[in-house]
Image (tube, helix red, strand yellow):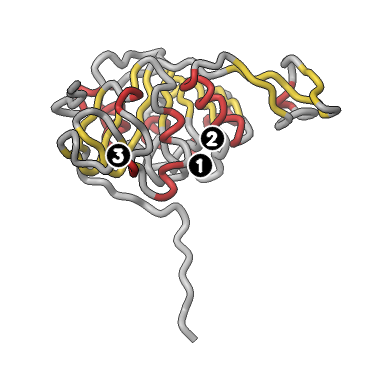
Amino acid sequence: MINRTVASVKEALAGVESGMTLMVGGFGLSGIPENSIAQLVELGVTDLTCISNNAGVDDFGLGLLLQGKQIKKMISSYVGENDEFERQMLSGELEVELIPQGTLAERCRAAQAGIPAFYTPAGYGTEVAEGKEEREFNGKPHILEHAFKADFALVKAWKGDTAGNLIFKGTARNFNPVMCGAATITVAEVEELVPAGELDPNQIHIPGIFVKRIFQGAKYEKRIEQRTTRKRG
């Protein structure tokens, strides 16, 4: 059986260069590839285009890359938790493409499935549709969206095996799975790495064929974006 394991995050991100386009998994701060992001900071690569549901917060997630001005362009759905993102966007230092969340997910999934483009009603009649082909289906207007093209997809799973099979947990399933196989190279970091054959086949969310490199991460913080508590009366 093919063994997709690499010894470290450094080996996993070998080949990442300045100017590349990266998909980065996660939903808010849930299920983000913390070790891979830290390695990008360490590598010092710049002029990156990052495709991600969000832009992290000021001192965590993709916010760490924004602090070092390593990101040239963000393609995201939700960016409201990051002051540095706002500052760079308003000052013109950062290119930003905001996309409806479902469209973002589908553009990833289309790339994963080898579908070059698709029509969607989301965004019609707004700035999202500017310059895009429009077509009517069943009396409803749609716009043409193209699948993403990325050099690396960096994802995080709860558990994986040496063959690259992955199991995601909770909210981490929102964007990580559709990014697997949607780039030239998919790197998966996992909380627990087990030998091939140990995972229940019925529980696997993504088969190893979509993963090029896998490694076991360490020291996950698993932060909460906005903690809300209630006092007992």
Secondary structure type for disc 2 = helix
Which residue, given by chain and number where applicable, does mark 1 sit on?
Answer: 83
Secondary structure type for disc 1 = helix
- Give the residue drawn at x 41%, y 13%: 19
Which of label 2 and label 3 is nearer to you? 3
What is the crowding at mark 3: few (fewer than 14 residues within 10 Å), some, or many (at least 20)?
few
What is the crowding at mark 2: few (fewer than 14 residues within 10 Å), some, or many (at least 20)?
few
**Three-letter code, disc 2:** Arg
* Mark closest to the chain's N terminus, 1 or 3: 1
In the depicted view, which residue is nearer to us: 67 or 12? 12
- Give the residue drawn at x 48%, y 74%: 230
Disc 2 to disc 3, C-alpha distance? 46 Å
Image quadrant of residue 179?
A: top left
Left or right position of 22 against 162: right
Residue placed furthest toward the right: 139
* Mark closest to the chain's N terminus, 2 or 3: 2
Which residue, given by chain and number where applicable, does mark 3 sit on?
Answer: 201
Secondary structure type for disc 3 = helix
- Give the residue drawn at x 16%, y 28%: 8
Marks 2 and 1 in Cβ contact (< 8 Å): yes
**What label does residue 147 carry, if any?**
none
Q: Residue 24 in the image: x percent, y percent? A: 41, 30
Image quadrant of residue 102?
A: top right
**Three-letter code, disc 1:** Asp
In the depicted view, which residue is nearer to us: 95 or 103? 103
